[in-house]
Image (cartoon, rainbow, N blue to C red):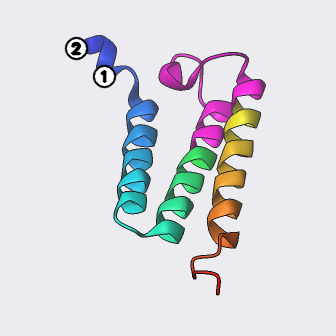
Amino acid sequence: MRRLASLGPWWVVAALLAGGVGLLAGGQIRLGGRLLGISLLGAAVVRSVAPEATARGLRVRSRWFDAAVLAALGAATWIGSEIVTLTPAP
């Protein structure tokens, strides 16, 4: 149990991502996409500034590689949710 508790920031990111997926499933495409993008961007910030021991659940490769990938995914998700066309084509 102690090992799960040490994943601190990962749980916050996972909860926000789950909320975004829930919004998407509920039909709130733009809001869900924004929440997914913001949570990934937040994960990138946490990964880039948090000590290695704190960012355990977000640590996969080197600090800057992880942060760059999370930031790129967050930005792409957020931008994609903003530019998607939600009205049917005639």
Identify the residue at image location x=59%, y=20%: 59
Q: Which residues are magenta?
A: 43-66
Looking at the image, the residue that sits furthest to the bottom is: 90
Q: Position of residue 71 (x, y in %)?
A: 71, 43
Q: Amino acid at mark 1?
A: Ala
Identify the residue at image location x=36%, y=44%: 15
| Residue carrying label 1 | 5
Q: Position of residue 26 (x, y in %)?
A: 34, 64
Residue 54 visible in the shown view: no
Identify the residue at image location x=74%, y=44%: 72
Q: Position of residue 86 (x, y in %)?
A: 57, 77
Q: For the residues labelled 1 and 2, say whether their Cβ atoms are less than 8 Å apart.
A: yes
Q: Amino acid at mark 2?
A: Met
Dot 2 falls on a residue whose secondary structure is: loop
Q: Is residue 38 found inside the magenta-colored segment of the image? A: no
Q: Position of residue 54 (x, y in %)?
A: 50, 23
Q: Is residue 56 found inside the magenta-colored segment of the image? A: yes
Identify the residue at image location x=35%, y=55%: 22
Looking at the image, the residue that sits furthest to the left is: 1
Residue 64 shown left or right of residue 55 in the figure:
right
Residue 38 - label: none
Could you give the CA–CA distance between mark 1 and mark 2, rounded to whole angstroms? 6 Å
Examine the rendered structure and indicate whether residue 48 appears above or below residue 88.
above
| Residue carrying label 2 | 1
